[in-house]
Image: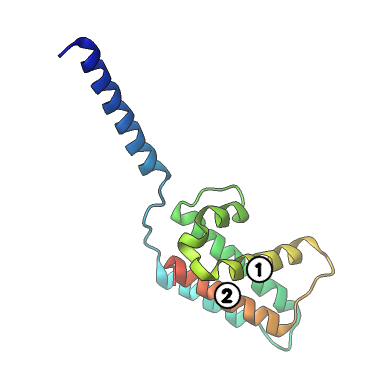
Amino acid sequence: MGTSAITLFAAIFVVGVLVFVAILLTSHRNYTFNKLEYQSDFLAIENSLVKENPATYNMAVVEADKLLDKAMHEMGVSGRTMGERLKRCGKEKFGTHLNSVWRVHKLRNQIAHESRFSLEYLESKRALAVYRQALKDLGAI
C-alpha cells in the first residue's frame, strides 16, 4: 500500500470522527426534568388564574410561557429567544401540537408588546391547556 492510500484512509477516518463529533454536539441530549418542581410551578400558575380578576389572565399566560422556555433552555435547545428554540425543536418535540404552541407564544408576545392587549378568561384557560400539553410533550410534567 502506498503513502497516498494511507493518507486517504487517514483523511477519511478524520472526517468520520469530525462528523460523529458534530452529530453529538448538535443533537438534543436527553434531559431528565425535576417533574415535581415543574408540576408544582405549573399548578401555581393555573391557580393564579382567577376568573373574578382580569389582571390575572395575561399574567398566567406570561408565566406559563416562561416555564416552557425554561424547560426548553434546560434541555439544551439552542437559540437566543424562545421563538428560535421553538424553531429548533419544533415538530420533533411538539408533534401535532406545534401550531398551538406557536399560537400561545404569539399571544404572550402580544401581551408583552401591546400595552392595551388583554385576554379573556377562557382564552387564558385554553392557552394554559396548550402550555400544559407542551410541557408534557417535553417530559417536564
Quadrant (top left, top right, bottom left, bottom right) of the N terminus: top left
- Most foreground residue, 64 or 77: 77
Residue 64 appears in the picture as rendered: no
The reply, left or right, for residue 28 in relation to residue 84 is left
Mark 2 vs mark 1: which is more N-terminal?
A: 1
Q: Looking at the picture, which amino acid does disc 1 mark?
A: Arg
Which residue lies at the image location 21% right of the left edge and 10% below the top edge?
3
Label 1 crowd bin: few (<14), some (14–19), many (20+), radius 10 Å: some
Residue carrying label 2: 130
Which residue lies at the image location 73% right of the left edge and 89% below the top edge?
52
Kindly state the secondary structure of the residue where label 2 is placed.
helix
Residue 126 screen position, x and y as percent: 63, 80
- Most foreground residue, 2 or 81: 2
Q: Is residue 33 above or below residue 24?
A: below
Residue carrying label 1: 103
- Most foreground residue, 115 or 89: 89
Residue 35 appears in the picture as rendered: yes
Kindly state the secondary structure of the residue where label 1 is placed.
helix
Residue 37 screen position, x and y as percent: 45, 70
Label 2 crowd bin: few (<14), some (14–19), many (20+), radius 10 Å: many
